[in-house]
Image: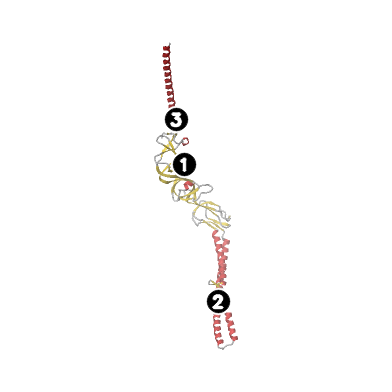
Amino acid sequence: MRHNFTVTTKRQKLAAGGIVLILLAIALYVYMGMGKDNMQKVRRNSPVVEVQEVVRADMGRHIVLSGQTVADASISLAPKYNGRITAVYADLGDWVEEGQILMVQDLEDLDISIAQNAAAAGAARADVRETAATYNANLSSKKNAYELASAKYERQKYLFSIGAISQDKLDSVEAEYSAAKAAYEVLANQQAGGMAAAIESKELLAAKQEHATEALEKQRSDMILRAPRSGIIAYRNAEVGAMAAAGTKAFTLVDNGHINVDCTIGENDAAILQAGMEVNVTIDALGKDFLGKIIFVSPAMDEDSKSYRVRVSLDNPDNTVKAGLFAHTAVDILQRPQTIFVPQSAVLTRNGEQYVFVLREDGTVERRVVKIGLLNDVSEEILEGLAEGEKVVLTNQDKLQDGMKVKVAAE
């Protein structure tokens, strides 16, 4: 009985060991299967990203300009004075030259006034000559009398000194001398700047009358409305016989010989756009391109629109371009030669810090802080943080963390 118990125990131990080995094999199989599934799951959950290799190249900015054509001049012409219209020499659509008469108001009353004032000015000028002649004759006479009285007085003083004449005689001669001297000085002292007061007064009256005549002549000239420059009559409100009111528009003169295109741009474009750049302007309504030149970039931002104004000048020799047409052009400007830049989508910002994700050789990504330089519509210059040949991630950055494994999308 003892022998049988021993054999049974050994068999039981072997059976138990076999069961343990089987269980271990099953556990290992299950563990390996689960590990493989987890690895496949990890691979399936790795973010798919697009990347771009960093290269050194010329960085430029593409600036689109669009706006409306504007005539070089559009001038409203109105009479300066009220008056009846006696003649109109320009019609709607007429081409007129600089200085050409467009309209004439009634000049009859003015012509009479001008003639009267001119006659009065002539009379005043004659009065000046008469006064000057009288004064000069009187001055010469009084001067001669003074000189004779002075010589006589000197002789009488000598005779008195030797006792040849009495004191009464000397006093009488001295009185004549003093009177002659006073009469001369009254006239001589009127002179100031070479002209006597009496003559100057008459001269000023004559000048006043002449200026009054000139004012009337200027008014007469202003009542003949002339073209201030060459152009086309785009508006007319003037008819013979009608009353023209001062300041009321009678004509509009448009000069289309030179056309401008006014555009607005943002501050980044205004910082690099300069006057003098040549551009090719397209006007869709005409289906034509025109050579133009940037002639003005506003030096200050418009407070209302928060933009900058740009004016492009176009030549319009055949007057085919009219004001108010939509026009557009583009300018390509080199911002920095041979520099490193990446698409804007590659650069992220958090807490005031700019960074990118860089793809490592092992398929993981690195979060890299960068320093930004110039910007354009699609790219940002990298001054620090990236080297030529590295690859930056362009998509799915919100799913990435530093060191995470990623899958690169097929190009």
Mark 2: which amino acid?
A: Leu
Marks 2 and 3, the one that precedes in the sequence:
3
Q: Nearer the viewer, residue 280 or 52?
A: 52
Q: Is residue 85 above or below residue 123?
A: above
Question: How many neighbours does mark 3 have within 10 angstroms: few (below 14), some (14-19), or many (20 or more)?
Answer: few
Residue 201, horizontal then vertical, whole percent: 57, 70
Residue 1, horizontal then vertical, whole percent: 43, 10
Marks 2 and 1, the one that precedes in the sequence:
2
How far apart in space, not on screen, are marks 2 and 3 (Cα)? 126 Å
Question: How many neighbours does mark 2 have within 10 angstroms: few (below 14), some (14-19), or many (20 or more)?
Answer: some
Q: Is residue 315 visible?
A: no
Residue at which label 3 appears: 42
- Secondary structure of the residue carrying tag 1 is strand
**Picture quarter containing residue 88?**
bottom right
Label for residue 139? 2
Q: Is residue 161 left or right of residue 345?
A: right
Q: Residue at horizontal 46%, vertical 41%?
A: 354
How far apart in space, not on screen, are marks 1 and 3 (Cα)? 29 Å
Residue 135, horizontal then vertical, whole percent: 56, 75
